[in-house]
Each structure stands twice: as structure tokens, then as C-alpha cells.
Amino acid sequence: MTKLNFKDFELSSNILSAIRKLGYIEPSEVQEKVIPLVLKNNDVIVKSQTGSGKTAAFAIPICEKIELEERDPQVLVLSPTRELSLQIKEDFIDIGRFKRIRCAAIFGKEPVTIQINALKQRVHIVAGTPGRTLDLIDRGVLKLKKIKYLVIDEADEMLNMGFIDQVKSIINRLPKKRATFLFSATMPKQILDLCDKYMINPTNIEIKSKSSVTDRIKQLYYQVEYYNKFDLLNKIIYTERPESSMIFCRTKKNVEDLTAKMNDRNYSCMALHGGMLQADRINVIKSFKRGEFTFLVCTDIAARGLDVENITHIINYDIPMEKESYIHRMGRTGRAGECGTAITFVTPKEYRFLEEIKEYFNLTIEEGKVPTLEEVKKGKAIFKKSAETSPKLKKDKAEKLNKDITKIHLSAGKKKKIRPGDIAGAISSIDGVNPEDVGIIDIQDNFSYVEILSGKGNLVIEGLKDKTIKGKTVRAEKARK
């Protein structure tokens, strides 16, 4: 059977250009099966493990279908965590970059005023957690009358986190005439009931992994007394020498305590937990994705929705209390067909939890052999030597896409009655600049941002020195990152 190409879906040139620069060569199995159905507005239920490319499976066709001039949101994506909502937003923006698609992420622990201001502008797609989404609907800020597409992502996790009633409440307020796409790693009865009630003749798709988890991920456990955990962690790090690793703890206090101990040993590490400010969480995740440090010490907030390339080791410093969390944590490694290692520390009192995990998921988790003193000594010397060199930075998948895009800061906004058309018109009148070179325009009260495409950022900055926008002199400069 001939392998499909993204061109076979008859996508527009601006979508094809964006996904090509993002490194999408040919569709994955889930993309091959889902994209045509979304393009036809069919309801779809997808059972698929993490790392299968499902976000692009709905984001690519939805970006194709977006009506650009419509002011109110046309798409609502519900997901269980802030991190996943932000990642979905970034994926939509990247795929829809050349079509100038605007997406907003809404979630708790960020000032609601920021999100209200974002929704007051033209927004095509909203990606949010159920609680904040419901809050903004109740406030009358998130308008639903033009919603044509509902995506429910990680449905089983929303059930586990107790969000399912909020999800139902949101669905009941949406237009009846819409397409609904539901994605889930597992299909508990309550999720199937949700599908029966709210979806119309859905197509069921199940994506089975090409290789099993046990083929891709080596799973080990070590029985260890609580007070010996850190000593064992050092031995494992020196002998395994992870290139990029997530270390999971049960509570934020455990995360902070372990991070402090690791910093004292000069490990390249940072913490991530739900008690942190959202801006700090975002910065830590971005830094980890870029490969600026080796060990991310975290709670289960990072077990889902965090798509980081080439994580070699997952270490369960604390065994999870919920069986499903083991699978979600483990799913951070061995992604996109790569291999990985999952290591679990188990105290004697916790051994029954390990047995339950093995039995429930029919997993073979072998007991690891504690490294000898000689192995640790030899490994430590190699680890220390490699740690002296700069961290190996990871390639950002959007790097090629963003290479020819310059974000410009303009010193005028809503208070000077500036509108997107005024900015686009002034920039398009510069010699050598076309309307197609003007990307997304974001107007705040006292300033504005505009993306300039095709590598023409410097040309626009120079050209605006001799221009006015709506009769006003405006200062233009490259936006700070």
C-alpha cells in the first residue's frame, strides 16, 4: 500500500508550508486516519497512546477549516492540565502560522484579566482546562455561538481528575451543530457514555503501537529503604548517565527537598510542581525542552501533556499511588519510536503498589541490580567529565518555522485607536513588503505586536521610521523575547 503524503489531503499551501518547516515528513497512523474525517466534519473517537502524533491529527485539519475573518472562537479544545493547554496552543499557532491563525490558552493560576483581554480580540481557537473555561463562559467573556469544533483531549485523565461534570456542563452550552473529536488513551465506561450522549454517529479509531511498551522501554525497580533513596539515585545516575531525565516525586515538598539535595551535588536540575507560579512553570518547561539542564524533578503535573524529545530516563523516586500514573510517567520516554528506561524506587511498605501495577497492566518490571562500588566509581568519573561540557541543546521543532519570522513591538495600541487594518496597511505600503508578509497582529492598550514573515523584519522596522499609522508617529523595534 502506497504511503500517504500530507499533500494527498489537499491542504492549502500555507498549512503545507508550515508543517513542512515543522519537520512533518509523512503522516503518522493516527494522522492518516483522523485528518480526512475531521476535514469532512465527522465526529471521531480515537483511542491512542501518548506520543502518536494525535495533536497534529486534529490541529492540521482544523487549521485548514478555520474561517479567518470570523471574530468569535470557532474551536474549543478541552484538556486536563495547564501544560497541555499551552502546548496545544503552541501547536495550533505553529501549524496555522502562515494562515495567521490566533489561539488563546485559558487555565487557572494565571490572572484571569490576561485571558479576558486575549478573548476580547479576534481568537479562532481556545484551548483550556475545564474549570477556567467554565468560569469564562459564565462571565460572558468566552462566546460559544460560533463554535464548530469541540476537541476533548486526554478524556480519561479528565475523568481521573474529576473534571467530567465540568466537561458535560460546557458541552451542554455549545451549539448542537458542531463536530466533536474525542481522544483518550483508555476508554472507561463513563467516557463511552459521554460519547453516546454527545456525539453523532462517531467513527471509532484505535491506534495500536507499532512496538509494545516493553519493546521500547526497559523497566526496572529497586527495593530500597526510604532513607537510602538518595544514595541509590546517585549510584543510578553515575552508572546509567541519563542524557535527559524526569525524576517523579509524590508531593511538591519531596520535589523541593530532592532538588535542593541534587543542587548541593551540582547536578544540572530544576523543579516543577503545582505550587509554582505559572510563569515560572512555563519557563522551566521551555528550558527543559531546549535541553538547558539534565534533570527535571517534578510531580505528576508533568506526567501528561509534556512533549519533550529524547528523554532517556524516567525515574520514579516515589512510586505513584495511582496505577495509571505509572503509565503516564513512563510515557514521557520512548516517544515517537525511540527507546527509553523507566526506573522505580520501591520501599518495602510500597511493594504491593508495584505488584498491583504489574498485574493491572500485565507488565514485566525486572528487579535492577544495585551497581557495585567499582561500577559507581568508574561511572562517576565519566559522568563528571561529561557534565563539565555545556549541556547538549535540543533542536526546537519550530526553529526552522520561526527562522524567517520577526516579532516587532510598536509603541501604539488601543488607546490611540489603532486597529489591525491600520497596522497592516502601513506595513504593506513599505517598498518590498506585501500584505502576505504581515503575520499575526496583537494589539494591547498602549502597544502592539506584529509578526513579519519572509525575513523582512529589518526592512519593516526601517520602513516604519518614515511612516505614520493612522496619522500617528509610531516607534518600531524588535520585540524582546
Image: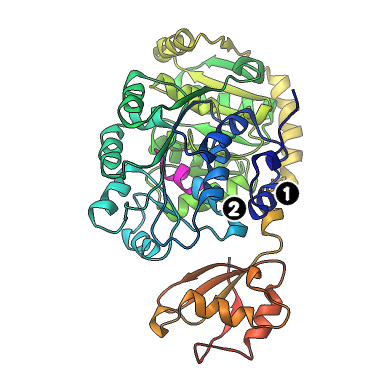
Disc sitting over residue 94 in the figure: 2
- Residue 240, quarter of the rendered image: top right
Left or right position of 262 against 120:
right
Q: Between 320 and 1, which is closer to the camera in this rendering? A: 1
Amino acid type of the residue tagged 1 in the rendering = Ser
The region drawn magenta spans: 77-87
The color scheme shown is rainbow
**SS for tag 2?**
helix
- Residue 437, quarter of the rendered image: bottom right
Whether the magenta-drawn stretch holds residue 256 is answered as no
Q: Nearer the viewer, mark 1 or mark 2?
A: 2
Left or right position of 264 against 197:
right
Against 55, is 351 above or below? above
Residue 284 at x, y = what percent? Answer: 53, 49
Disc sitting over residue 369 in the figure: none
Mark 2, Cα crowd under 10 Å, few <14 / some 14-19 / many 20+, is many
